[in-house]
Image (cartoon, helix red, strand yellow):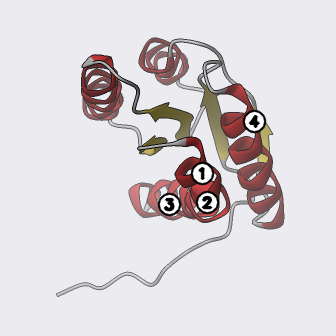
Amino acid sequence: MNILPQNLNGKGLRIGIVQARFTNEIGSAMVEVARKKLIELGVATVAGALEVPLVLQNLANSEEFDALIAFGAVIRGETYHFELVSNESGGGVTRVALDFNIPIANAILTTENDEQAHARIQEKATDAALVAVETANLLRH
């Protein structure tokens, strides 16, 4: 068995970030946390846009990035809309990753309320930055 060591050296990697504008306060905070972590790992960042899977698809199609990160938050409301948005965005992100063979760290939060979303900003954004760099390096190897 060939076990590869964890590689978190971001130098030379191009990581694209897409942030949903809905729940902008949470998404913006996540982007800022990840941006700082990526810079710490040696990566320069590019901010994203509104319709996450479509923008991810265009970024992946450009072949300019080694990995992508999706940020946003879907917060449960009083209707079935939460399930539809959560499922469709998650499925879209996965589909783009598989169709374009590019790692995408999916950090679109799905929470019951704003408090849960705020509580997850730091950890999920940091994890997304780490996952993007590690997976890009793994696929390069």
The residue at which mark 4 appears reads as 28
- Element assignment for label 4: helix
Question: Most extreme residue toward the left, as rendered?
Answer: 1
Measure the C-alpha gap from mark 2 to mark 3.
20 Å
Question: Label 2 near label 1: C-beta < 8 Å?
Answer: yes
Q: Mark 1 or mark 3: which comes first in sequence? A: 1
The residue sitting at 65% across, 18% down in the picture is 21
Q: Mark 2 or mark 3: which comes first in sequence? A: 2
Image spot of residue 78 (x, y percent): 35, 23
Q: Nearer the viewer, residue 48 or 60?
A: 48
Can you tell which of label 1 and label 3 is closer to the viewer?
1
- Which mark, residue 115? 1
**Badge 4: how crowded within 10 Å, few (<14), some, or many (20+)?**
some
Q: Amino acid at mark 4?
A: Ser
- Element assignment for label 2: helix
The residue at which mark 2 appears reads as 119
Q: Nearer the viewer, residue 74 or 114?
A: 114
Question: Label 3 near label 4: C-beta < 8 Å?
Answer: no
Q: Does residue 141 appear left or right of residue 59 in this picture?
A: left
Q: Does residue 59 appear left or right of residue 2 in this picture?
A: right
